[in-house]
Amino acid sequence: MDERTVLRQPICCIVGHVDHGKTKLLDKIRGTAVQTGEAGGITQAIGASIIPLKTIKGICGPLLGKDANFSIPGLLFIDTPGHAAFTNLRKRGGNLADIAILIVDVNEGFKPQTIESIEILKSFKTPFIVAANKIDLIPGFRKIEKPLVQSIPEQDPFFQEKLDTKIYELVGKLSEFGLESERFDRVESYTKQIAIIPTSAITGDGISELLMVLVGLAQKFLENNIRLHIGAAAKGSVLEVKESAGLGKTMDVIIYDGILKRGDKIMIGGLEEPIATKVKALFEPKELCEIRDKKSKFCAVSEVKAATGVKISALGIDDVIAGMPLRSYTDSEFEQVKADIQKQVQEVLVETDKEGIVIKADTLGSIEALTLLLKEKDISVRKASIGKITKKDIMDAETGYEKDPLKSVILGFNSEREADVSSTDKVKIITNNIIYKIIEEYELWVEQTRNIMEAKELDQLTRPAKLKLMPQFLFRASNPAIIGVDVLEGKIKVGATVMKPDGTQVADIRSIKEDQDNLSSVTKGKQVAMAFAGVTIGRQLKGDEELYSYIPEPEFRKIKDKAKYLSKGEMELMKEIAQIMRKENPVWGV
């Protein structure tokens, strides 16, 4: 095999919140390239746009300088709609993208998918720059046919002030994620600071600067990541599987290393085992066709070279799932490639006997992203798989309920439930199409559920209470003594023992009655009739004194651990009871 290497195009993914201008920005880059008059300036591949270095130089013009010496052949933009494409595109050990553009509407700032994109970029350690888009909507903006660094000082002062404010709002938000950033022309170190480039996908402002920064970063920092092995087996990631007119089921694949030819044998990761098949045909859209355009025409090619996107026609690919790894192989490599591919899949599809939650997602990359973000928050995952949430998932999640109800949970990212599946008394199902929202909702549910569990546990203990006997409501002196009681503080229940202010235990509460209703417990502010066993009013009890609930020492310690669930009055009462008991034992309840 030829082991020589050359530099390929860096793979660049555009991520960000919906409607912040991802598609428009790429359309503007494509349009600008066409306007520069570079014939065939952009090759439109499957779900990707390849912009050659010559075209980039034409767009950037003098920004790159006469002596700019670049060895990368250009840039490959992944332009599948939505940030989900980023999580679909994976290779072993991380995301397929070499670099990313986080696009933010400079007027709206951070939104849910912006935050999710940052979390995912951080988890995959993908370098990125920020396009602060829609500067044309800031009041006072004028189109000036000059580079940004020259046009901004010539803009209306109000616009300049507003733009600076918006940029530093983004700087502030990024700092919350532990990321340093600065406007691109003020960056002191690209290794420490993220560049923010003001852009307009409508007017084209900032497009040249965006490409300039991308090319510069790729050339300087990514060289070791973008070496293409000449003659090596093709390696790729499945972007999408769909029906294509006249072709049946096809796969849209991003090839990131090697060369793939018509007739090559390929292995694709599967849920149960890898899928082995042969390339029947390779298709690329005709030049400048947009892949999402139903009118676009494809042309068959005999081979494709990384990095690019291609539509593959092959038999037996009905069960292929987005995000799965793809490799070409020879007969002698069959077993090795099969084992390697399946190992890659199993690294992501977690299933162990350890404790943890169950997660489901639509693609392998999504599972990987969700698992990474959960692990960053020390949330353990017992099982992760792809597809709809099923009754079997409910059973899997339920097995951990007795040991830890807070782990009896299923999190679903872009994963629907089967028709007959819903949350049960023992299993909580949380689904969303934004990963960090799922995690946020899970953490909130854990907090609420833990509070409920601890509050229930507290109710099993003898809580602090202070009672005042009301002699005017003496119904029976003994066997049992029944008398009116004013609950001054706390909560007390049937079966509790009461004591005098000197710590003497005097009686157990046999029953509590309010009007004609029997109660199991009673709280501060209530006046009720209580029946006391083993005591006579006038002997052991005078009938007008104050009493406290008697709390066994082990229970007192447990209640202290759950003090946040007690009222201020109950906390004061805990101190009173402790003072009473410590007359005999100075370290009681400590």
Image (cartoon, grey):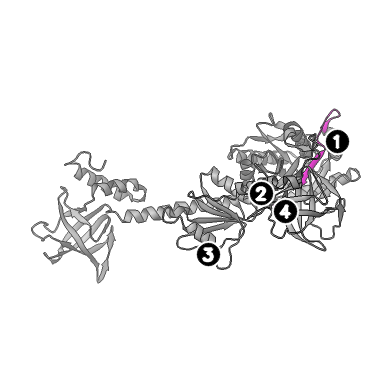
- At x 61% / y 49%, what residue is drawn? 346
Which element type, helix, strand or loop, lies under badge 3? Answer: loop
Vertical side of 586 occupied by 31: above or below: below
Q: Name, please, the residue furthest toward the bottom.
A: 516
Amino acid type shown at disc 2: Thr
Q: Which residue is mark 3?
A: 422
Amino acid type shown at disc 1: Gly
Q: Earlier in the sequence, mark 4 or mark 2?
A: 2
Which element type, helix, strand or loop, lies under badge 4? Answer: strand
Q: Which residue is mark 2?
A: 87
Q: Which residue is mark 4?
A: 276
Mark 1 and mark 2 in contact? Answer it, CB < 8 Å: no
Residue 109 visible, this angle: no
**Magenta range:** 64-83
Q: Earlier in the sequence, mark 1 or mark 4?
A: 1
- At x 27% / y 65%, what residue is drawn? 519
Q: Which mark is residue 61?
A: 1
Amino acid type shown at disc 3: Ser
Q: Name, please, the residue furthest toward the left.
A: 539
Decide: few, some or many residues near mark 4? Use Cα within 10 Å; few <14, some 14-19, many ≥20.
many
Label 3, label 1: how far apart the Cα atoms are: 58 Å
